[in-house]
Amino acid sequence: MRILLAGPRGFCAGVNVAIESLRQAIRRYGTPIYVYHEIVHNRWVVERFRHEGVVFVNDLNDVPQGAHLLYSAHGVSPDVRRRAAERGLCTIDATCPLVTQLHAVASRYARDGYTIVLVGHRGHDEVVGVMGEAPHAIVLVESLDDVDRLDPPNPERLVYLTQTTLSLDEAKRILDRLRERFPKIVGPKRHEVCYATQNRQEAVKQLVAQADAALVVGSQNSSNTQRLAELCRAGGVETQLVDGPNDVDTTRLAGCQTVLVTAGASAPEDIVQDCVRLLVERFNARVEHHDTRDEEVHFLLPKELRD
Ligand code: SF4
């Protein structure tokens, strides 16, 4: 068996800085320390921090007054910030800077009287946070049908924004339809989905044709991981989305010649390597590294942790 180990894979700059922020916050303030939602959408990362004394909450009422609270990489709405301030919480903002930028752009367009068409997945933490910037001005679009149903008050003042972790192909289909229906719609000047999402999807696209099976390492609630798995399935290969080696169904890999291995942006590399080791030991697999692009993106720690 041949393993095509795709690169880039795994941690992106936003996940790196969110995890480092939590580590530093533990060092400075000790535990228990609180995080609003999962720091990143990965079971291992969350469980490891939980063992260190981190408490993940979905409700600010579960955080004692005056405690330290981190906002996760996916960001929060202004309403959450306001309520945290009212409770006297000491907050540390570990939101990915690319998500923060999305909030700022949404809020600016709303102030300028635009209707914002947000292409994303309902209920995802990032989408919930961004929609909270201007609930009256943002319409969520998840599909082509949603685009067809849009009836904005002023089609001349319309802007689209996208969740950072969408499928590139699906986003393109939706944006094409939006531009077709609303030729005056404007959009972001820079990338429509984030660099890490693009790079991981492009690596999979380049490699999938050589594979007859794929392992996508990451958690079920990770949007970008799900998109990688969809891409592998669309490439016609037998695909397993696994949290770690214990989830790998090796019977489904028996007889496979070439297995593509990739990982979502919140999946730790040691877990990816555990999965690779399993295939090496079970199938005497040979590992080939295929790095399709260098990533040199780094973000600063949140200002609350910069000395
Ligand atoms: S996937 Fe992109 S937007 Fe999301 S945390 Fe990583 S760098 Fe930030």
Image (spheres, rainbow, N blue to C red):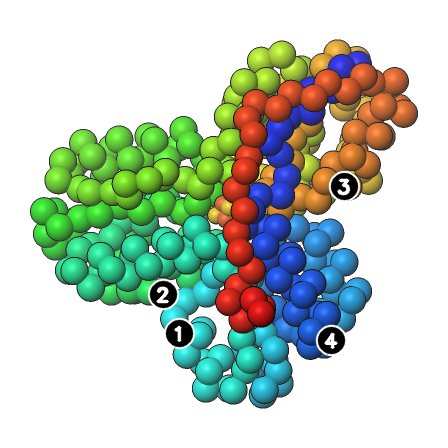
Quadrant containing the N terminus is top right
> Mark 3: few, some, or many residues within 10 Å (few <14, many ≥20)?
some
* Amino acid type assigned to the residue bearing label 3 in the image: Ile
Q: Callout 2: helix, strand or loop?
A: loop
Q: Is 79 on the left-hand or right-hand side of 109?
A: right
Quadrant containing the C terminus is bottom right
Q: Is label 3 or label 2 in front?
A: 3
Q: Is mark 4 within 8 Å of ligand 1?
A: no
Q: Which residue is mark 4?
A: 31
Label 3 to label 1, Cα distance in Å? 36 Å
Asked whether residue 72 appears in the rendered view, the answer is yes
Q: Is 117 on the left-hand or right-hand side of 61?
A: left
N-terminal label among 1 and 4? 4
Numbered mark located on residue 271 in the image = 3
Image quadrant assignment for residue 83 = bottom left
Asked whether residue 36 appears in the rendered view, the answer is no
Circles 2, 1 touching at the beta carbon (< 8 Å)? yes
How many numbered discs, if any? 4
Numbered mark located on residue 79 in the image = 1
Q: Callout 3: helix, strand or loop?
A: helix
Label 2 to label 1, Cα distance in Å? 7 Å
